[in-house]
Image (cartoon, rainbow, N blue to C red):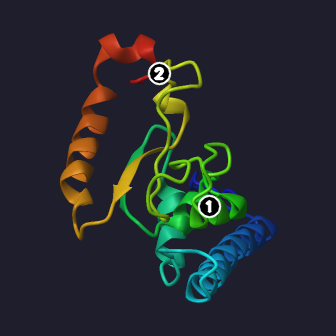
Amino acid sequence: MHTQSEPTSEISFDDFKATVLNDYRIAVTSRECSLLGRREVLTGKAKFGIFGDGKEVPQLAMAKAFKKGDWRSGYYRDQTFMMAIDHFTIENFFAGLYAHTSLENDPMSAGKQMGGHFGTHSLDENGKLKNLLEQYNSSADISPTAGQMPRLLGLAQASKLFRQVPEMNTDGLSN
């Protein structure tokens, strides 16, 4: 479902059409997940849910500007963004909604935190640091209004600086 993130100066009509249709598919998929998830909560089938409907277009735009190695510090409800960068699927959405305890099914928290809170893993299955320049990075979301802002500023500053520290180049942390 990934949305193209590399800007191009020229694009053919067919490529433009494919991009628009793909973005539309991501937005509709995210919206339908929200609507169905809300229904599941309101009918008592799921205990609690936070949904991302109404924020699809800005999240698609953000996904287009987001590059591997970048970090996001989000407020919950960024499901469209996470779908657009291929870090969140319909299956993951419902596993989170029903608090599935498998990390494979609910890769954000294995059912241990509220739905709609997204994060990526910086360690591989053996506990070793991944090359953070080769993945999209997301610090785990928090719920308090504007609570992500101090962390966002720190991540932005660190992201800018770590790319300029030559000694970190061998660790996959800088360019």
On screen, 77 above or below 131?
below
Mark nearer the N terminus (2 vs 1):
1
Q: Amino acid at mark 2?
A: Leu
Q: For the view shown, which residue lies furthest in the left direction?
A: 150
Q: Can you tell which mark lies on residue 129?
A: 2
Identify which residue, 147 or 98, lies in the foreground. 98
Q: Can you tell which mark lies on residue 135?
A: none
- Left or right of residue 72, residue 96 in this image: right
Q: x and y percent of residue 34 in the render?
A: 59, 79
- Locate the C terminus by quadrant: top left
- Dividing the picture into quarters, in which one does residue 148 lie? bottom left
SS of the residue at dot 1? Answer: helix
Identify which residue, 21 or 107, lies in the foreground. 107
Q: x and y percent of residue 97 in the render?
A: 58, 67
Q: Can you tell which mark lies on residue 83?
A: 1
x 44%, y 56%: residue: 113
Q: x and y percent of residue 60 in the render?
A: 55, 68
On screen, 154 above or below 23?
above
- Dividing the picture into quarters, in which one does residue 141 lie? bottom left
On screen, 54 above or below 94?
below
Q: Amino acid at mark 1?
A: Met
x 51%, y 25%: residue: 130
In whole angstroms, how far apart are the C-alphas of marks 2 and 1? Answer: 24 Å
Q: x and y percent of residue 138 in the render?
A: 43, 47
x 62%, y 88%: residue: 43
On screen, 112 above or below 96?
above
